[in-house]
Image (cartoon, rainbow, N blue to C red):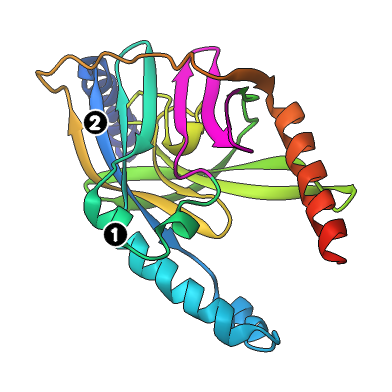
Amino acid sequence: MKKNAITFLTIFLFINSVKINSQIKNGSITYVKESIVNDQEKEKFKKHPNYEKFNKINEGIEEALKYMSFELKFNELSSIFKLNKSLTLEGAKYYKFALIPHGNSVFYTSKNTVLEQKQIFGETFIISKEKLKWQLINETKIIGNYTCYKAKAIIKKPYRGKEKEYIKTAWYCPQINASYGPIGYSGLPGLILELNDGKFKYKASKIVLNSKKTYEIIKPEKGKKVTEQQMNTMISEAMGNFKRNKGY
């Protein structure tokens, strides 16, 4: 009897989930950005000879983050993610530091495409980004009214002449069957409601689904087209030239 009850509950939840998922055709998700530097890193940072100067900048970044929000809009075919610009944010002294590294970019995603429109080196680029290979993990937590599941991905980038691995952690919601997320992260069986991107975290603060509005997602076209690998090489070379000129 107990086994039959469990089976019935599983079938009920599956059918209910499919029913909910099939109803979601569009959405608008507001995300906030938070610093996630841990206590160990803070203690290590205190030993830096320029601690006072850098700490002032970090405090300014924390203040600017309070006024910063991002919006993800999606329909059944694609999504767009970008900063909500405001005069309050632009009035914050260190808001440009708070935008690093992706804050002022526009991200477009569809089934087979991830693009980042980015302004760097005084020029606008359209960066074709690679799809991530996610590892699904059997861990859950509640974000708002939604049960979310954990996933991890490893990104490799050039660093000081070598290749360095960066771990990205996402919490996605299968109940919302939109395979999108902040800063172009996508490809999971559900909408990403929280993303750990290293030193910063993007977390959903407002979720609007099935709006009566029509979300027209416009693919960004303006900019020099490059691959993600080409952009990483350009940034690595620029950093190397900067350090050589400074005598580092």
Q: Which mark is residue 152?
A: none
Residue 161 in the image: state x and y as whole percent.
Answer: 90, 48
Tell me if 192 is positioned left or right of 224 in this view. left
**Count of all numbered marks drawn on residues in the image:** 2
Q: Secondary structure at mark 1?
A: helix
Location of the N terminus (image quadrant) = top left
Q: Quadrant of residue 53?
A: bottom right
**Would residue 110 be counted in the magenta stretch?**
yes
Q: Which mark is residue 28?
A: 2
Give the residues drawn in magenta, as a range.
Answer: 102-126
Q: Seen from this angle, which residue lies furthest left?
A: 212
Check disc 2 and give the amino acid type. Answer: Ser
Q: Residue at x 68, y 21 (%)?
A: 226
Is 65 in front, or is 137? Answer: 65
Residue 165 in the image: state x and y as whole percent.
Answer: 76, 48
Check disc 2: other Cα within 10 Å, few if <14, some if 14-19, many if 20+.
many
